[in-house]
Amino acid sequence: MIKIKPFICIAIMALASLPSSGQQTKNLTLEDLIPGGENYSMYRPAYLHDLHWKGDTLHWSDKNWNYILDAKHMKVSKVETPMIDKTRPVSIENTTRRIYKNIDRSSQGFIAHTKGNNLWIDQTQLTDEPEGIVCGQTVSRNEFGISKGTFWSPNGRYLAYYIKDERGVSDYPIVDITKRVAKLEKWKYPMAGMTSEKISVVIYDTQTEKKVTLNTGDPTDRYFTNIAWGPDEKKLYLIELNRDQNHSKLCSYDVETGHLDKVLIEEENKKYVEPQNPITFLPWDKNQFIYQSQIDGYNHLYIYNTSGKLIKQLTSGQWLVQKMIGIDAKKKEILYLSTEISPLQSNIYSVSYRTGKRKLIGSNRGVHQAKLSPDNRYLVDTYSSNDVPRQTVVYDLYNTKHHKVILDAADPMQGYQTPEIELGTIKAADGVTDLYYRLTKPVNFDPTKKYPTVVYVYGGPHAQLIHDTYHWDAGGRDIYMAQHGYVCFTLDNRGSSNRGLDFENVTFRHLGVEECKDQMKGVAFLKNLPYIDQNRIGVHGWSFGGHMTIALMLRYPETFKVGVAGGPVIDWKYYEVMYGERYMDTPQTNPKGYEACDLKKMAKNLNGHLLVIQDDHDVTVVPQNALSFIQACVNARTYPDLMIYPNHLHNVRGKDRVHLTHKIVTYFDDFLKK
């Protein structure tokens, strides 16, 4: 475990190798640093394009060459003429992705895709549903680990798919201003406490063309997630979750009849249960599977049999399994990513099914991504750490000394003025929990000067802003602002990700309250630094971070001089059912909690300069949030500013992101530097 003493900074240079002082004269521009900028790709660490396995050969490309690694001999060859691999599913999918949604290919070559609101297999229409019923797409707004809507069986005979009935869900109006006469578009948006969608799961047999709907009973106020196939294709497994999201059941269904076979595992929690991963069967035993659960406070791997009996807990400890990579059937080992070394890292481990012994694979630093070869013998590992821009290594898992580095990216910012970055911990508002912070100092830092400071915040579940990656995760905006004389500070408060269930759910039923208390501990730490101007502290964030930005300005109006809040949640009653009710319950069952977190009711407290930024096509945090807050401020005679970005969804992407960042920095220049 990497430990950092509270209140003691570890000073590290943001760059692995710095040029001589005479060379440190060039600044980077927004076009260099911000995604969508004209030169952005030039200042990112190099990476390998289209990296994929084909047998025991690894393929990738750059602008001029295609490369092939023979993993058996760890030898690389290159081909100048681009190769077309007609056997790869990605190639076929890419040709149709412009037309169809949610494409999924079976092992038999069938392609399932959604066209309009109906499901097709190849050129055959499988469903014919009226408007308001959608087939084969994601459901539950991508919560509960749901990322697609179709699920092929192992041998490709069966296709399971979602049907989503949205006819009872309220329409949210979005206006398309690109038309000569602005056109009204309607989006289904179930708000907390209101009628939600109804989900069913159907199985289609490609041989008999028979459809079977799972007999789950009345789907009202129930969620079905983590769909998985049994290896013999006779059973379909899923996790059912009640609307309160505090009781989950792993169920098996008979494929031929659609009837419930049995309930294998049940979990209950006074706050919430949050299933994120389908079960995975062991290739050497068709009656045993891996089940992931946070039941002991951290996400770990458990082995169960198909009768629902716990065989063993495979991993344990005050760290969590982040993702399963794969299973080596020959060695009976499971590979996964975990935070065992540090919550700031994501490292590759294997664990033995027989003994439970864990083994680190690759570097003990940084954040890793991994891909196994089809036979699970070779692994390609791409990682970054604070002083390693990016490296890609191929390992022979049967002899990890037999490996090859196929990418060792140079520092793309060498020769430019870049800031010093410090990492450390402080105590949370509970006085016990360590919180990680990142502090980026101005370029050409002078400890005798007083600097304006901007706190960048997110703070919500399923997000973490500080990792052991290139520049400790400091983005281009931080580097740009450091070049322009700002201190930038970020703190991952309680409620954020990768620290376990108790760390996250302390915010239950009052989102934004405990998080703000932790952020103020960060501000107290800043105020003790001699180079921080206590009268020039600003705050900025987007989405949950937008909520936090405004909440901090309203709850602590004498602390923050300037704020910029993008896509902010203002009133949790305006947010969607699945996420909102998990962390807040419903407005009907938690009225005091919703009222205490409603920022409209605190509009009178606004003291400093606040810029609210809203995308007009945002169907994640709908514009009603920002506009209702502006109305509350008008009523309270307080005076925020408002910027609308037309034709953008939740956040500003593409080349307009440069404009967004310029707008943010200029606002701080105008009101915080003075």
Image: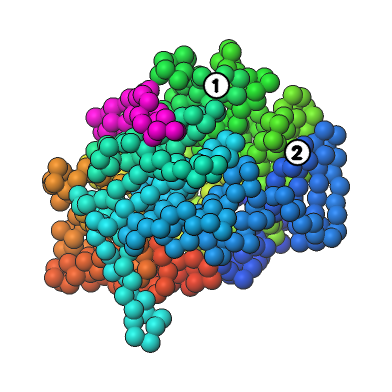
Q: How many marks?
A: 2
Which residue is at the front of the view, 221 or 276?
A: 221
Q: CA distance from mark 2 to mark 1?
A: 25 Å
In the rendered image, residue 305, in percent from the top left (x then y), is placed at 46, 18
Residue that appears at 44% across and 33% down: 256
| Left or right of 111 in this view: 196 | left
Q: Which residues are magenta?
A: 246-274
In the rendered image, residue 379, in percent from the top left (x then y), is placed at 69, 35
Residue 382 visible in the displayed image: yes
In the rendered image, residue 519, in percent from the top left (x then y), is placed at 33, 46
Q: Name the residue carrying label 2.
A: 55
Please say if 662 is above or below 511: below
Residue that appears at 77% across and 27% down: 401
Q: Residues within 10 Å of mark 2 (few under 14, many from 20)?
A: few
Q: Name the residue carrying label 1.
A: 286
Please say if 349 is above or below 49: above
Instruction: Reply yes or no: does residue 214 show up in magenta.
Output: no
In the rendered image, residue 2, in percent from the top left (x then y), is placed at 53, 30
Which residue is at the front of the view, 201 or 569?
A: 201
Q: Which residue type carries mark 1? A: Lys
Q: Secondary structure at mark 1?
A: strand
Which residue is at the front of the view, 222 or 614?
A: 222
Residue 13 visible in the displayed image: no
Q: Residues within 10 Å of mark 1 (few under 14, many from 20)?
A: few
Residue that appears at 84% across and 44% down: 76
